[in-house]
Structure formats: structure tokens, C-alpha cells
Amino acid sequence: MLVAPSILSADFGNLQRDVEDICKSGCDLVHVDVMDGHFVPNLTIGPVVVTAIAKVATKPLDIHLMVKNNTFFVELFAPLKPEYISFHIEEEKHPHRLIQKIRSLGIKPAIVLNPHTPPESVEFLLKDLDMVLLMSVNPGFGGQSFIDSVIDKAARLNKMRNKLNPSCLIEVDGGVNNKNIQSLKDVGVDIVVAGSYVFKHASKEVAIKSLQI
């Protein structure tokens, strides 16, 4: 299991320290939540802050767009060369076109599904994706409780993925901890995003290692 701590739960007064800490503690990716205050009721960070993160992070960036006007934000963050850029299927009218655009920029494209969105919504896009991110909380704020139905959803997506594009990864974001990590692994999840669990733990290294099962 790969672990991508979400900097949404970091101490923004000591952001460099926290980003360096999770990288030294063995994380696999640095998850960056970009919210515009329109698609979700929260406003987070723009390219100036993410550029600063990219300069100190020694692990690849995993940028999760929770925005309207996805194409604008893709072009804004593409120069940082993150490993992944993911966008919400619920917001994008032309997802295949945007997938192609992200890939043309040398970045791995990913699609995000909100808790209520069925995995079948990406069936005809799976062959063109590097990752599908399943939200296990409602997007917008950190520290929420895990929505148990994502386990069945991930299992359904795993069957579809294995049939159509076995190399496409499954990521889960929200409320992940050492109590539900085994259930996620059992249904084929490859990457977990963990914010509060990692950043509020007495040891970021212990927290990350407890998820890398």
C-alpha cells in the first residue's frame, strides 16, 4: 500500500517542516488538495504555495483538484510536473478531452468520484486513466469520518479495473487510519490518502508505516 499524506492537515505555519517530515518519514507521494470555494465550500491553496511545496518535497506530488473550470487549474499546476493530477467526474463535461490534455503535459491523469458517484461512471474512461480516486468522505474539509460504503465501491471498481485496465491504480481519500487500512487493501486499493491520521499522530513515521501494509 502506498501512502500519500494530505497537506490539508499540515501546520501551515510550519509547512516546509511538515512537508520535509513526511518525506523523511517514508511517504510515497505528497497529496495536495486544491479547492476553489465553488465546487466545494472551502478555499485552500494556489500555485504559489504549491510551488513552495514542490521545492522542498522529495516525493512526487499528487494534486487533487476540487474546482470548477478544471482546464484552467490543470494549466496552472502543470508546470510543477506533479506525478498525478486528478479532477472530479461530477464537474467535468468533457472528461476524455481533459484526460488527453493532462497526459499530453507529461502528467498521469486521474479521475475522482464523490461518495455518491458509482464506479461505473468511469467505465468508458478506465483505459485512458492512470488512477481513480474514491472519496471516502465528502470533499471540502479534513478530519471527517470514513464512509464505510466505499469498501464495496472499491471492490466493484477493482473488478472493473482488472478487466479493462489492470495498470490503473485505485486511491482512497478520507478518514483512512490503521483500523480500516486492511479492509481497503483486501478490496484492491493501491494508494491511501491520510491527513489527520498522519499529521496528528505522535510520530508521522509510525503512522505512515502502519498504513504501508
Image (cartoon, rainbow, N blue to C red):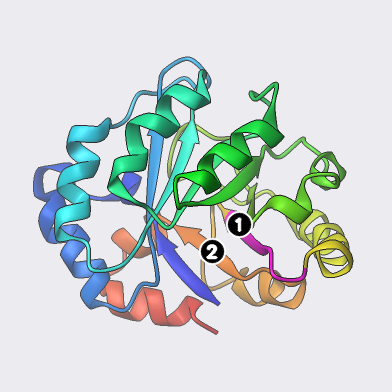
Residue numbers of the magenta segment: 166-172
Residue 102 disc label: none
Q: Is 154 drawn above or below residue 15 in the view shown?
A: below
Is residue 149 visible in the rendered image? The answer is no
Eyeballing the image, is 128 above or below 89?
below
- Residue matched to label 2: 192
Q: Is residue 198 left or right of residue 212?
A: left
In reply to whether residue 107 is colored magenta, the answer given is no
Residue occupying image coordinates x 82% and y 64% = 155
Asked if the stretch drawn in magenta spans residue 168, the answer is: yes
Spot occupied by residue 123 in the image (x, y as percentages of width and height): 85, 47
User: Callout 1 environment at 10 Å: few (<14), some (14 to 19), or many (20+)?
Assistant: many
**Quadrant in which the C terminus appears:** bottom right
Q: Nearer the viewer, residue 79 or 158?
A: 79
Instruction: Indicate whether 134 appears above or below 29.
Output: above
- Contact (Cβ within 8 Å) of mark 1 with mark 2: yes
Mark 1 highlights which residue? 172
